Image: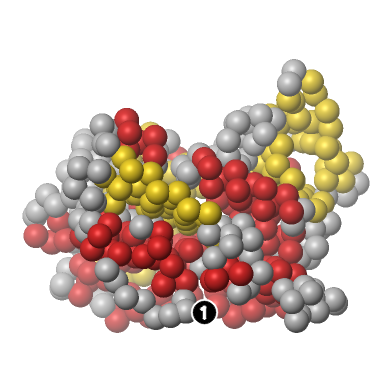
Amino acid sequence: MSETYDLIVVGAGMAGVAAANKCGAAGWRVAVVDALPYGGTCALRGCDPKKILRRGAEIVDAANLMRGKGVDPHGLAINWSDLMAHKRGFTDPVPSKMEKGLKGNGVETLHGAARFTGANTLEVDGQPYESRRFLVAAGAIPRPASFAGADLMIDSTDFLSLEALPKRILFVGGGFVSFEFAHIAARAGAAPVIVDRGARPLNAFDPDLVEMLIERSAGVGVKLQRETEIVSIAKADDVFMVAVKSCGETRTIETDLVVHGAGRVAALADLNLEAAGVDYGYKGIVVAPHLQSSTNSAVFAAGDSADTKGMPLTPVAVIEGKVAASNMLKGAQTAPDYAGIPAAVFTVPELARVGMLEAEAKEAGHDVDVRFTDTGGWYSNYRIGEKSAAAKVLVDKSDGKILGAHLFGPEYGELINFFGLAIKLGLTAKQLKSTTAAYPSVGSDLGSLL
C-alpha cells in the first residue's frame, strides 16, 4: 500500500478539478483519477463544444432572418467537417492544460478506472491507493434504455464527434440534448425529428415559452412528436427503422441516425461503492447538505455524482466541488448556495430560466405578479429580423422581490444573468429596473420587462 493521501478525487471534470486544485494549493497531498481524458463532459463532450457548433447554426439563422432586409443568404451553408475541426481546436488542448494546472498545484494525476475496495481504499487498474478522504465527481452517463435495439443509438459524445452529418436524424427524448442538437442539425441541412414520450418537452422550463420554442423549431424544420414512445430500433444496411407507439398505434420511422437524448444518470455503477459503504441511487450519492456521504464520513460527492438540490449544470458542479473542498479543509458543514443560478437551452434562439416556475411560486404560497411580455416586435429583435421572443417575470406582490424569470429570444442567455444576480442578492423589481444599461443593447430591454 502506498503512502496515504489526504484526498483522492474520482473524476477530472469541472467539479473534481476545482476541488483538487483548492486542496492541493492548500498543501494537501491530493490525487485525481479518471479513465477518460481530463476535462470532463462540459469542456470535452458537452457544453463547450456544443456551443462552438451552435455558432454555425447562429450565422445561418441570422442570415435567413435578414433575407429581404439587405442580406442575401443564398449559398450560405455549414461545412460540417470544417466546423468540427474548429471545435477540436478548442477541445484537443484541454486535457493537457488541465493536467498542467493540476500539477502546478501539487496534484498527482492518475489515469485509469477507479474502484473502491474499502472505506478508505480504492484501486486504479489494480494499483491500490489509500486516502483519508475522497471526493466522487465522476459525472453522468446516458440513461439506460430497455427497448430492443437501444444499443444502436449514439450518445451526445458521439454526435459531437461526427465527421459527417446524416440527412435524417431522430432524437430520442425531449430534453436539452435533443433540442440543442436538432437546432444545430437543422441549420446544417439535416431533417431532425424529436420523439418525446411526454406531453410537454423541456418540462423544467416555462410551458408558455416552451410552446413558442416548439413553434419556432418547426419553422426551421425541427419536427416534434409528443406522447410517442420508442418500441424498438432495427437496422438494415445504412437505414434505421424506429418503431414508435402513439395513440395506441405502432408505426415505423426510417432515419439515418438515432441519437440518445433521453436524460442522464450518475456514473457510479463501476465504482464499487458498496465496498466503501456508500449509499447511492440513480440521482447520485446520498449526501448531507454539506455534501458528505450519509454512510461513510470519508466520502464527499459533487456535481452529477451527488444527490442534491442543485440542477445538473456545470456551474453547480463547480460550486459543489469548491464547497466540498472547503468543508474538508476546514472541517465545516457549509451547504452550497443554489439561489439565482440560471439555466439555458441553447437552441436558436435560446430559452432561459432562473428561480421559480410560475406553478412552483404559486404552490409555495406566493402572491405572484406575472409580468408576461411578447418582445418579438421590440427594437432589439426587429433589428435582427427575429419575431419570436418573449419574457415572463414573476414578482412577489408582498415585497416586490423577483421570484423567477423566464426568457425566450436572441441573447436572452446573457440577459437572464441580470435576473440571477437580482434573485441571489434579494433585489426587488424596482431596484433592478433602476439599472441603466448601454443603449441600444439587449440589456437595455431589462427595465421594460419589469
Residues 190 and 164: in front is 190
Residue 266's quadrant in the figure? top left
The answer to whether residue 244 is visible is yes
| Looking at the image, residue 127 lies above or below residue 194 | below
Q: Amino acid at mark 1?
A: Pro
Q: Residues within 10 Å of mark 1 (few under 14, many from 20)?
A: few
Residue 291 in the image: x percent, y percent?
A: 23, 47
Q: How many marks?
A: 1
Give me the residue at 28% from left, 64% from top.
432
Residue 423's quadrant in the figure? bottom left
The answer to whether residue 259 is visible is no
Could you say whether the residue bearing mark 1 is in a helix, strand or loop?
A: loop
Residue 223 in the image: x percent, y percent?
A: 74, 45
325 horizontally vs 316: left or right: left
Name the image quarter holding the N terminus: bottom left
Residues 78 and 13: in front is 78
Give me the residue at 52% from left, 79% from top.
93
Name the image quarter holding the C terminus: bottom left
74 horizontally vs 69: left or right: right
Residue 205 in the image: x percent, y percent?
A: 48, 45
The residue tagged 1 is 93
Give me the residue at 15% from left, 72% from top.
26
Picture colour scheme: secondary structure
Q: Residue furthest right?
A: 237
| Looking at the image, residue 194 lies above or below residue 79 | above
Residues 46 and 267: in front is 46
70 horizontally vs 309: left or right: right
Q: Residue furthest left?
A: 331
Residue 151 in the image: x percent, y percent?
A: 69, 41
